[in-house]
Image (tube, grey):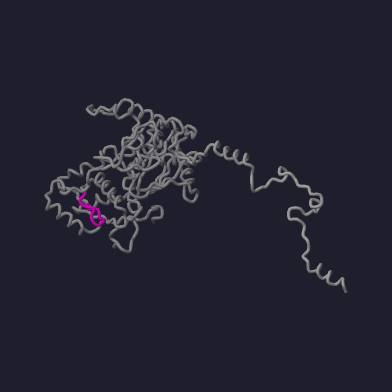
Amino acid sequence: MLLLPGLLRRARAPPRLPPRRHLSRLLDRYGFVAPASLTPSPREPPRAAAADSAAAKKRRAKKPPYRPPSSLDRGGRPPARSDLPFDFRFSYTESTPASKPIGLREPKYSPFGPGRLDRPWTGLCAPAVDATLRDVAAEDPLPDAERGLEEARRRERERVLGEPLTPAERAFLVEKCQKNRTKRQINLGRDGLTHNMLNDIHNNWKSCEAVRVKCLGVPTVDMQNVCHQLEDKTGGLIIHRHGGQLIVYRGRHYNPKKRPVIPLMLWKPAEPIYPRLIKTTIEGLTVEETKQMRKKGLHVPVLTKLAKNGYYASLVPMVRDAFLTDELVRIDCKGLPKSDYRKIGVKLRDLVPCILVSFDKEQIIVWRGKEDGSLQDQTHKSSPSVMDSDGASVKNETRDQEQTPSDWSSDESSGFSSSDKVPDDKPVISDPDPSRAI
């Protein structure tokens, strides 16, 4: 009975736990304490180590901030040099050296980038020959160096083209470039034949002898100029044309490893300022007569309606035929960008020729001029001919390869299709693919 309270007290007492830092009782029995060097505290680093780490951080050089790669950074390389003997322009079909601007919209920043081309930028082009060598007062302002470049380009083009293609070879290349055989195609839009497009054509010529070019929009008003510029600037030969579809052949002796150096434009340069297209008064008329003519032009029956990004090769013959009976011609351009139908008006002025009256209410109104016929005598004066130019085609071609100017013009009805909003007697130039026309 006396042992029971003692057992109860032992049972109620909490069990004795070992020390937190040591699970063994040997240290309590022998009183051994480990030195501080063997058990350093991880939370309290030595002062010397902390000082060394701080000094190391100060001595460590700072990493420069990340700088993304830029095409403007030449890295000390010299500017590119090109042996192409023509002036570099943004568009070769939509700009003519004959038309002089009256000002520039921005400083003369080269679109090729600073220090990337050895040619200066004049605001319009990068000339192949220094413009200061020209003599404006001379009868022929073209310097001897530039004439030599043109002659060298003509001889080189004839050498690369080689022997004329036989009918079988031509048919094989044309069939090889059709839509059902290849998707390789270069699109030529409202900007026309641009400078960077020359590089695309040569890139396609690396793996194929001919490339298909699809022309749509404003440049198709003057397809002769498009064909001339394509052959002249690329050095190739157009072996087939159907509407706005062209097939450009590179030549028998074309070597991709010796292709010309074509520096790329990094951005589109701003267009210069040209004189106003629509004057306050038309030349030869008074102010009242001009106002009456513009009012009358808005009520003239519509000759045709232009579709956006259509094929307009038959527009010039249509306007010429309409001038045989009518004094004013109106062309409906609803839905087209303002810049597009203004460019079309300029081409009509130079190709028909005619006088621009108004662009009001998205309509092109042109006047044939007075009955003396002074304007009609200037037909085809401003537009270059494909076959008459030196660089347009090879002189020694067979009859199968020779194409007359009438062959370059496509069927007038190939670009027409009916529309619900326009009467049947007014054709609509809307079908972008003339090959589907019946």
Q: Nearer the viewer, residue 264 or 379?
A: 264
Measuring 24% from the left and 49% from the top, which residue is drawn there? 320
Q: Nearer the viewer, residue 354 or 92?
A: 92
Position of the N terminus, as image quadrant, is bottom right
Question: Is residue 359 left or right of 307 when viewed as pictured?
Answer: left
Residue 119 sits above or below residue 321 on the image: above
Is any part of residue 316 visible from this angle? no
Question: Is residue 121 left or right of 262 when viewed as pictured?
Answer: left
Residue 373 point in image, percent of width and height: 17, 45
Residue 418 sits in which quadrant? bottom left
Count of numbered badges drawn on the protein: 0
Magenta stretch: includes residue 357 = yes
Q: Nearer the viewer, residue 243 or 263?
A: 263
Measuring 46% from the left and 48% from the top, which residue is drawn there? 178
**What's drawn in magenta, residue-wise?**
356-365
Residue 271 point in image, percent of width and height: 30, 43
**Which residue sits furthest front?**
2
Residue 429 sits above or below residue 408 on the image: below
Question: Is residue 341 left or right of 115 when viewed as pictured?
Answer: left
**Which residue sits furthest bottom?**
1
Magenta stretch: includes residue 125 = no
Q: Nearer the viewer, residue 261 or 400?
A: 261
Magenta: predominant secondary structure element? strand
Position of the C terminus, as image quadrant, is bottom left
